[in-house]
Image: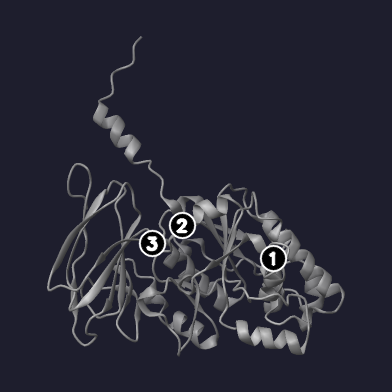
Amino acid sequence: MPRAAVPIGTIASHLVQHIPVASERFRFRFIARGEQACGLVVIAARSLRRCHPDAAIVVVDANDAPAMDAEALGPGVDLLHVPPGDDAVALAVGRGSRRHLYYWRHSRQLLAALPPDDRYDVHADADLLFVRPLDLGSLLGPLARGRIAAAVDESFLEYYDEVQRQPAVGTAGPLLQGGLLFANPADDGGLYERFWKLAVDAARAGRLAALPWDDMCLLTALLGHGAPLWERLLTLAPEWNYIADARKDPGALGCVAHCGGRTAQAEALRQRDRLLSETQAWGTSGTPPLRGPQEPGAVHTPFALTWPAPPDARACEISAEPAGATLLVFVDGRLVRRLLPSDEISTTIRFPKAETVTVVGLGGTPARAARLEEPSFTSQQGVVA
């Protein structure tokens, strides 16, 4: 019996809805132990979802007894309970201590407990705040070829001085930031196997306490200049993962705020309820920056606001009175349009598929508010909600 004919428009609509976005190829993994880390990882996971709705997320509850609420993490997050074991590193520094977790988060035990997955692996610290989308699409080619992406830590020069005073494993710079690492599990040169072996060997030899900057020292020993995996290193720009505290902030160009130190972490937890709001555009506005959900309309430069794109959207209209600011328009973290200062701006941005659209405003007059309307998204058939 012949099948009923399906209208061409229905077939086209079905195919269009399955155009992939870059974030679908990534799985972010977070590890949390202790009350403060469990509170911070909720902010990290929820802010990541605001910036990359289609990325996979797995959170490891590393407390001895389960302590995390899956509902608080938001939909689509895999929550695992994996207490750290009594390994050689634990015997040297104390099981479950901060120094143990620096190494254990890349251990054989932890990696073996993760659900099988063919996506690219992203290790992310629990104290990250995703401020605006990363250009994950730019990593697809390099990761497929076995590159490993990491940022250089701000303590590079201090680290360089320290290893000259007290030589230790990992003397080949630059010092790599361990809080946000991108790798291809199918082709990473055995990064984490090598890492864990270095940690265990150092623990058994009584040298673990002498390693400056803990896990970053070992990453540098593997990926630094002249190291075994040197040719695989892909150095990320500072805005991908910057250390946030009371004195330093990259403003609208920062993508991920790494809340380093107790002051920054306490401030993130203090703002927890506001940061977890789901009702407004996501981003930053003004100096000092107000991070989190923002009211549409009046914003102060520098600002960066992100909106989710409906699944069937193929274009959006950007309308603004930028108050002398230059506007940068990003689709899924990739710069697609630069709009020079003007009294009024109205432009259409087209794309095959998108999960987010971000508008960044630079320059202008900080004391004078700019007007930025919520983008109007359209599909091939017309306006979408």
Q: CA distance from mark 2 to mark 1?
A: 35 Å
Q: Quadrant of the N terminus?
A: top left
Q: Position of residue 207 (x, y in %)?
A: 82, 79
Q: Position of residue 123 (x, y in %)?
A: 58, 64
* Tag 2: amino acid: Ser
- Which residue is under mark 3? 333
Q: Residue furthest left?
A: 343
Q: Earlier in the sequence, mark 2 or mark 1?
A: 1
* Tag 3: amino acid: Gly
Q: Nearer the viewer, mark 2 or mark 1?
A: 2
Q: Which image quadrant is residue 94 in?
A: bottom right
Q: Is residue 45 left or right of residue 370?
A: right
Q: Secondary structure at mark 3?
A: loop
Q: CA distance from mark 2 to mark 3?
A: 9 Å
Residue drawn at (39%, 71%) of the image: 276
- Which residue is under mark 2? 138
Residue drawn at (78%, 72%) of the image: 89
Q: Secondary structure at mark 1?
A: loop
Asked which colour scheme the image uses, the reply is: one colour
What is the count of numbered marks?
Answer: 3
Q: Nearer the viewer, mark 1 or mark 3?
A: 3
- Which residue is under mark 1? 83
Q: Is residue 131 left or right of residue 205?
A: left
* Tag 1: amino acid: Pro
Question: Camera-side residue: 200 or 86?
Answer: 200
